[in-house]
Amino acid sequence: MERTMPRDYYEVLGVQRTASKDEIKQAFRQLARQHHPDVNNAPDAEDRFKEINEAYQVLSDDNRRAAYDRFGHAGVTNGGMPGGGFSGGFPGIDEIFEELFGGLGGFGFNTGRRSRGPARGRDLRHDLKVDFQQAVFGAEIDIEVNRREKCDMCSGSGAKPGTSPRKCPECNGSGQARRVQQTFFNMVTVTDCPRCRGKGEIIDSPCPKCTGIGAVLGGRTIKLKVPPGVDDGMQIRLSSEGEPSTSGGPNGDLYVVVHVEPHEYFKRRNHDIILEISVNVAQAALGDVISIPTVEGDIELTIPAGTQSGKVIRQRGKGVPKLRPDATTAGRGDQLVVVTVEVPSKLTKEQRELFEKLGQTLGREVIPQKAGRGFLDRIADFLGGS
């Protein structure tokens, strides 16, 4: 597991939220030149470039950027996958700079110098339902994933047992076709060989089980560790757990989209848990010690004398673990108990007599309240500052 939640796209590109389209494009140019795997040999270059490209695809589109600014990552997912889904792999640096700059010659690149390599396998998505407790404390869950697996009959070669693929005579086994474009810079572009489709091999006798693909559809059980503090809609990426490549490249990734089921009593706000309770007028006036639920079990809560409807009692450290991008946790939020004083709608004869006596001592004067912020506004202010 490498990353549990996507980073802010503006942070990825290193620009302000008010950045213009030109500024976003310029930031992407610089980062693409630095991190594209065709020019960067660092182990994390591929993952870094995928993140940069994903951010650019969203922020360079006015509609998708507006949706992202309003709703975050949830506003730009299509079936949970940014950019309309994962196609497996990413464009070569020649394609990137051809779009951005209209050619590579001015930047000292020759696309014939370095192979893009075989394409990655297709990325997959799996939707996982977890209950509220599992989302708070984490869990280890077995998930069933349907994907293409290496064919056991041909061991993934795609050739009928007893036969072997032969080198493609068109590309001499390189899997690439080179084309010289007569421009001012005499650019050389490299594409997949049309005869072998980039594999570098020709299969004359395909495997009868996989029909030459080298993979068959099957099921796989994966043990997934759901980290504490995951929220609804978060994605957990499992590297190389997607489908295998059909051209000898690395496997794709598996993206697990978490769906948290609602709880009977608790609501979540960021790292805080909100619990609404009702007390009667006697408990509110005189105070009381009551039992309330938390995600860790029931505890005692003191209701102060004179409690009014809308009072919020904070229980520190009883909320959701704060999840860092590297899947570690840093402390916990709080539980916020919102108290409602419930006035009885039906009274027994004895209760009515008692209330009448109480009313005589309290008087009947009605005191108008000055216009100002209401109860709901005060609650919003409290929660907003938590």
Image (spheres, helix red, strand yellow):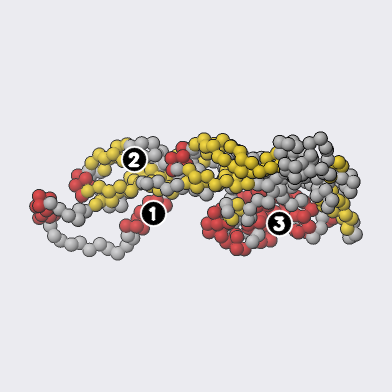
Tell me the number on the disc at residue 293: 2
| First of labels 1, 2 by sequence position | 2
Q: Is residue 66 left or right of residue 189?
A: left
Name the residue beneath numbered marker 1: 381
Q: Quadrant of the N terminus?
A: top right
In this rendering, would 285 be left or right of 214? left
Q: Could you tell me which secondary element the residue under label 3 belongs to?
A: helix
Q: Position of residue 131 (x, y in %)?
A: 45, 43
Up-down: is 49 above or below 186?
above
Crowding near pointer 3: few (<14 within 10 Å), some, many (20+)?
some
Q: Amino acid at mark 1?
A: Asp
Query: In 3D space, how far apart are the residues under numbered discs 2 and 3 (Cα atoms)?
Result: 53 Å
Q: Residue at x 80, y 45 (%)?
A: 199
The mark tally for this picture is 3
Image coordinates for residue 54, horizontal then vertical, percent? 65, 52
Image quarter for residue 164? top right
Q: Are marks 1 and 2 in contact (CB under 8 Å)?
A: no
Q: Specify few, some or many for label 1: CA neighbours under 10 Å numbering under 14, 14-19, or 20 or more.
A: few
